Image: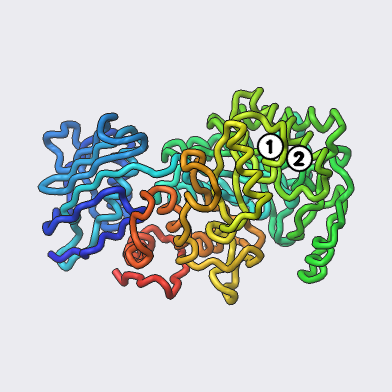
Amino acid sequence: MVLPLTAGLVPAPASIALGDGALALTPGTPVAGPPAAVERLRDAVARRTGVRLHPVDEPAAALVVLRIDPAVAATEGYALTIDERIEIIGADAAGLHYGVETLLQLLAATTDGWAWPTARVADAPRFAHRGIMLDVARHFFPVDEVKTIIDRAAALKLNRLHLHLTDDQGWRIRIDSWPLLTERASGSAADPGAPGGHYTKDDFREIVAHAAARHMTVIPEFDLPGHTHAVGVAYPELVEEPHQHPALLADAERLGHALPVKAEPYTGWGVGHSSLRIHEERTWRFVRDVLTEIAEISPGPWIHIGGDESLGTSAEDFAYAIERATAIVRELGRIPIAWHEAGAVPGLAEGTVGQYWGALQPTPAHAAQCAHFVARGGTVVLSPSDAVYLDMKYDADFPLGLAWASTVSVEQARGWDPSKVLDLPEDAIAGIEAPLWTETVRSLADAELLMYPRIAAAAELAWSPAGASSWADFRTRLGSLSPLWQSERIRFHPVDEIPWSAR
């Protein structure tokens, strides 16, 4: 049997040596190991090939052996050997999971059936934070769709799901102490015809559990003090009158969108017009209640408090709001995350993580804001909008997405160095996160077309060693994933810059 010389591996592993031989997949191939890892491998192989592996209890009787040994690699790392048998050793349960994902990518169709190339892989991630952000406020994704996104992101070794739960267009999480948030402010979206929706606390726990089973941590975001128009739909006394700034007026006229009106649902795309009433103590009872209830259903260590595009809030009020909100998160025993604008606040809670969404060439102000997070004992997550914003158009003619940051080809998404965006030591970079904002998204299919294939570029930059491969090598490996993505029914945009495999 003949196997492809270039394995369709994305992200690129830290080390791989491919041999000349092959190990055939046959019905009933015995597999042993931890049940969760065994079931992931069996289910994925069966979906793609129709062949089911047979679970056995004794590793000595297995052709495929999965096990955990902390000595094999760094955290989340693994070693994979394919020779006369297959062995995957994870440094931990997450590492074993990622080794299984690599094995699934290596499985190839041949003229005689399915087989794995002989290979030795030693692998571990470059960055701890490897994320995707999903904007469920502008377009609501039901629980099953969020689970699908989790499954597909985890297959690319991503390990954070940042859920943007609140924005001007809608409030998406039940808060028991403030029930009108979901009763009055969850039925709208960026699309005036969309039904909206929200997650009950049990829904959210289901998402968190599903993510955790795939070694992914959910990071909930409650955006403040701006992006809070929906709060005012439920509780008008908590927000200021909309700030009708010139850019908002111009965009509304250009797009034919209505302007925001206090206490009425907003379906436009404008930003920077909303603000909480910063100096009302009732506002801070509200903020504390929301953050407390979110913390109760979010076992992960982080809570995101937003902090971006607060054009309707004075600098002094913004600083007061960020200082107080990050302090509350700390009091709840969690680590605050905030968009990079919060780095302008002198009293930012120590250890707060910044999320940079500016351009690959940062302005001096943005660079200083990011540096302040590090000076306060935090780190920075990189989400440069002209490289990893998944809602940017691929080109000017693509029907979905926006282009305010740039149009972003796959080559542009892949062709930057995370260590060179900001003047920070590499250990101050927590990792990379690819946001999907959903102004133009109307379905999971729309979301997938914007995400794939560019999410693979973000995943590789987050996982693989610096300089692990060239653009030419990446595009070849990415193209080889086409059969796998098709078998998983992922709707990806077949951009011309990638040589997609037909099988």
Give the residue at x 43% y 75%: 496
Q: Are marks 1 and 2 in contact (CB under 8 Å)?
A: yes
* 231 relative to 376 in the view: left or right: right
Looking at the image, is 411 positioned above or below residue 178? Answer: below
Determine which quarter of the picture holds residue 165: top right
Badge 1 amino acid = Arg
Give the residue at x 21% y 64%: 5
Badge 2 amino acid = Leu
Q: Callout 2: few (<14), some (14-19), or many (20+) C-alpha neighbours within 10 Å? A: many
Give the residue at x 19% y 36%: 56
Cα–Cα gap, marks 1 and 2:
7 Å
* 242 relative to 226 in the view: left or right: right
Q: Which residue is mark 1?
A: 174
Quarter of the N terminus within the rendering:
bottom left
Looking at the image, is 19 positioned above or below residue 501? Answer: above
Per the rendering, the mark at residue 181 is: 2
Residue 259 location, x and y as percent? 84, 60
Looking at the image, is 203 positioned above or below residue 388? Answer: above
* 209 relative to 274 in the view: left or right: left
| Residue 26 in sight | no
